[in-house]
Amino acid sequence: MAPIITIDGPSGSGKGTIASRLAGILGWRCLDSGALYRLLGYAAGQAGISLDNADELARLALDMRIEFRDGQVLLDGEDVTLAIRSEQAGNAASKVAALPEVRAALLAWQRACAVEPGLVADGRDMGSVVFPGADVKIFLDASAEERAQRRYKQLIEKGLSANLQSLVAEIRERDDRDRNRSVAPLMAPEGALIVDSTALSIDEVLERVLDRVYQIL
Ligand code: C5P
């Protein structure tokens, strides 16, 4: 079984950045599981499927042809890298992610990513549901205001439009939905190192995570 590091946390906590930096340092594969839910939310919009139609969404999840290639995300051959990063796609993702049928449909695809020499997986339930036997578990948190600021900067840098006030409100709403859903709610898995990144730089967070990784691996 390939070694696995899971990084869970709310949106904007920096888990995606830390996961890809860590995967780069170790030379391991990286799984951005949030992108799967974003892809499904986007694909549902394209196909005109309602975000609460669990059976149709689960079928769509199984049929989607997904490729992650050199930083690009392809859906059935179409480059959707930018399209799935909008706040609208994030909100659609969090709605479809609350459906147990959807989560079950995406489970095998995620587990198949655990290949040698190792996998760094980031999301909400990586350490609790998808890879409960992971070697190292990290939970990254930060205040909602700080996370909204970071998202604002990212969106502006990507040339997308953004409004800070509505980002704070959307982040709170999404957190609430992710933490309080009945299936695979966002939580720190047992045994996880909890890092609050509100007042830390990316390098400081990475240093703490690496300390933990080298202690265990
Ligand atoms: O991490 P990201 O913001 O891209 O995730 C988008 C949404 O997908 C989250 O708000 C969450 O509802 C859902 N998600 C999830 N489980 C994961 C990863 C993401 O439910 N493992």
Image (spheres, helix red, strand yellow):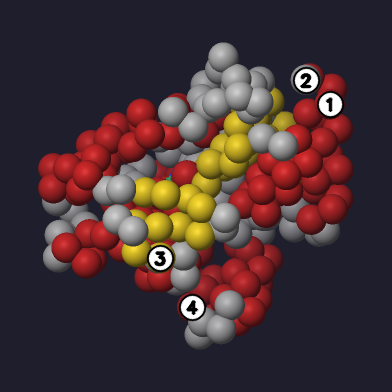
| Residue wearing tag 2 | 217
Q: Is residue 131 left or right of residue 36?
A: right
**Residues at marks 1 and 4, CA–CA distance in whole angstroms:** 40 Å
Q: Is residue 76 left or right of residue 31?
A: left
| Kind of residue indicated by mark 2 | Leu
Q: Residue at x 56, y 83 (%)?
A: 159
Examine the rendering and report whether any part of residue 158 can be seen: yes
Vertical relation: 107 (above or below) 216: below
**Residues at marks 3 and 2, CA–CA distance in whole angstroms:** 36 Å
**Label 1 vs label 4, nearer the camera:** 1
Q: Quadrant of residue 93?
A: bottom left
Query: Assess mark 1: CB under 8 A from ligand 1?
Result: no
CB contact under 8 Å: marks 2 and 4: no
Q: Residue at x 17, y 42 (%)?
A: 59
Q: Position of residue 2 (x, y in %)?
A: 60, 20
**Label 1 vs label 3, nearer the camera:** 3
Task: Determine the secondary structure under disc 3.
Answer: strand
- Tell which circle, 1 or 3, labels the residue nearer the N-terminal end: 3
Task: Determine the secondary structure under disc 4.
Answer: helix
**Residues at marks 4 and 3, CA–CA distance in whole angstroms:** 28 Å
CB contact under 8 Å: marks 3 and 2: no
Q: Position of residue 61 (x, y in %)?
A: 26, 45
Q: Position of residue 171 (x, y in %)?
A: 50, 64
The quarter of the picture where the C terminus appears is top right
CB contact under 8 Å: marks 4 and 3: no
| Kind of residue indicated by mark 1 | Tyr
Q: Is residue 33 left or right of residue 192?
A: left
Vertical relation: 10 (above or below) 194: below
